[in-house]
Image: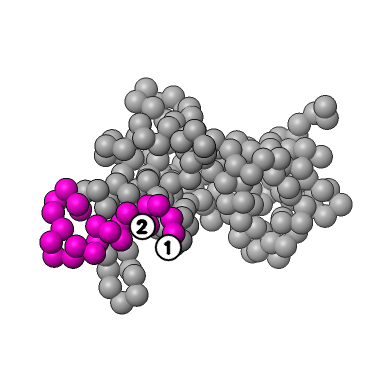
Amino acid sequence: MRIQITFAGTTPLIMHSDKLADSANEYTVMIKELTAKKKNKTTADEEQISKLEWMGSSYVDNNNVVIMPCGNLIRCMRDAAAITKNGRDIARAMSPITLHVPLLIADNDGELKERKLDALWGDPKHIDRRMAKVGQSRVKRTRPIFPQWAVTATFELLETVLNYTTVVNICEAAGLTTGLGDARILGFGRFEANVKKLKAA
């Protein structure tokens, strides 16, 4: 069975990809060059570091459109399903049709649409700066934040492993208890899930 799930945000989504954990990543390299200045960093350097962290924490496609990896959606549902011991079944039963889907982000008129990352920098409502714990220290980190968002993805569901009604219940629980993105323990990334069956082609 093919199903479509829409995750409609009810709290802001903070994005945090793992790209910056890669020492060879272009953003990581540029950040290191600036942080190496230590006490000699200028205000402009600090702002550039913030921008690079923001960009490096984003998921984008080859056209610089903000996306959500479908693996993150599966992980979210799997974490919620673990409560009822269905976690492994989610990964076995559900296969995304694509590796990623566009993240729909509200424009100034409140319309949810695909957005390019570079068009969002500089807008305070899309920039989250907060202190994060790194080792024994607390340092300032900058991440993209999307107050109004939604994402729709299509999956193949193997009903012999997990039935449709169970998937609906898991998705509803995931939106209430698990969420997507960063700072979920603080209540970010919560959503309402709408699951529907798609007609066979």
Residue 117 x %, y %: 40, 36
Identify the residue shown where x is 54% and y is 56%: 178
Residue 71 x %, y %: 62, 51
Identify the residue shown where x is 34% and y is 75%: 135
| 175, above or below 33, in the image | above
Mark identifier at residue 29? 2
Amino acid tagged 1: Ser
Amino acid tagged 2: Val
Residue 132 x %, y %: 32, 64
Whichever of callouts 2 and 1 sits on the residue coming sooner in the sequence is 1
Mark identifier at residue 23? 1
Answer whether residue 60 is visible to the viewer in this image: yes
Identify the residue shown where x is 65% and y is 63%: 82
What is the chief secondary structure element of the magenta stretch?
helix
Identify the residue shown where x is 27% and y is 51%: 50
Q: Dot 2: within a 10 Å radius of its alpha carbon, few (fewer than 14), some, or many (20 or more) residues?
A: few
Direction from residue 160 to residue 5 in the image, left or right: left
- Is 31 one of the magenta-colored residues? yes
Residue 137 x %, y %: 28, 73
Residue 115, by quadrant, is: top left
Callout 2 secondary element: helix
Direction from residue 90 to residue 136 in the image, left or right: left
Answer whether residue 188 is visible to the viewer in this image: no
Residue stretch in magenta: 23-46
Callout 1 secondary element: loop
